[in-house]
Amino acid sequence: MSLAVVDSGGANISSVLHALRRLGTEPVFTADAGTIQRASHVILPGVGAAGRAMEVLRANHLVETILHLQQPVLGVCLGMQLLFESSAEGAASLLGLIPAHLSRLPAAAGVRIPHTGWNLLRSVRPDPLSAGLDGEWFYFVHGYAAPLGPWTLATSHHSVDFSAMVRHKNFCGVQFHPERSAAAGARLLRSFLDG
């Protein structure tokens, strides 16, 4: 197995790489299209603004590379959001693999935006990636969220229900940070690597 972690310009990549190494892998952090294409598994991480991440992917000529990947791909946090068509965050155009628009989480009494902290996962359809994770707690940091749709594997709730895990063909995504989600997060990463 070879694992490429795409350099999308986000911060805090060291925790993702460390979590993957704890699982016995040696990930390659790269913006090289050839390395990404040759990898058996690809992770698209991200922290920050969607528009900025897309600028980095375009500058590195990686948009077409990512869109044509056939191996398992996992988008993490902002990386999951990039799989969608567009975002209300700066009216950003994204990769467009999933035909839906990301919206800002709505304010509500007693609810802080952005959503930062632990939240419960609820599976809505079976999938190898979400197997055994229903009712587990994961760590989230986000102000924008994906709607529910046929792509949704699991939901979470923060003022509204939103897609916490998604799948489109070989592309999966998680809105939370598995690398910061203790044993449940490690199980999810293991499931992805074994898939």
Image (tube, rainbow, N blue to C red):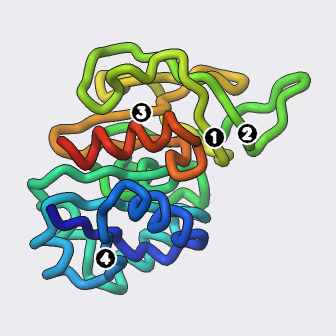
Relative horizontal placement of residue 86, taking residue 190 as reference (left or right) = right
| Residue carrying label 1 | 139
Measure the alpha-carbon separation of dots 2 and 3. 17 Å
| Residue carrying label 3 | 165
Measure the alpha-carbon separation of dots 2 and 4. 28 Å
| Residue carrying label 4 | 28
Residue for point 89% across, 22% down: 109
Task: Give the quarter of the figure containing the C terminus.
Answer: top left
Measure the alpha-carbon separation of dots 4 and 3. 24 Å
Name which residue type carries label 4. Answer: Val
| Residue carrying label 2 | 117
Evaluate if marks 1 and 2 touch, with contact meaning CB atoms under 8 Å apart. Answer: yes
Name which residue type carries label 1. Answer: Tyr
Measure the alpha-carbon separation of dots 1 and 3. 13 Å
Q: Position of residue 172 (x, y in %)?
A: 30, 42
Q: How many marks overall? A: 4
Evaluate if marks 4 and 1 touch, with contact meaning CB atoms under 8 Å apart. Answer: no
In this picture, is 80 found above or below 54?
Answer: above
Does any portion of residue 93 appear in the rendered image? no
Query: Which one is closest to the eye, mark 2 or mark 3?
Result: 2
Query: Of marks 4 and 1, which one's residue comes earlier in the chain?
Result: 4
Q: Which of the 4 quarters of the picture holds residue 59? A: bottom left
Relative horizontal placement of residue 63, taking residue 144 as reference (left or right) = left
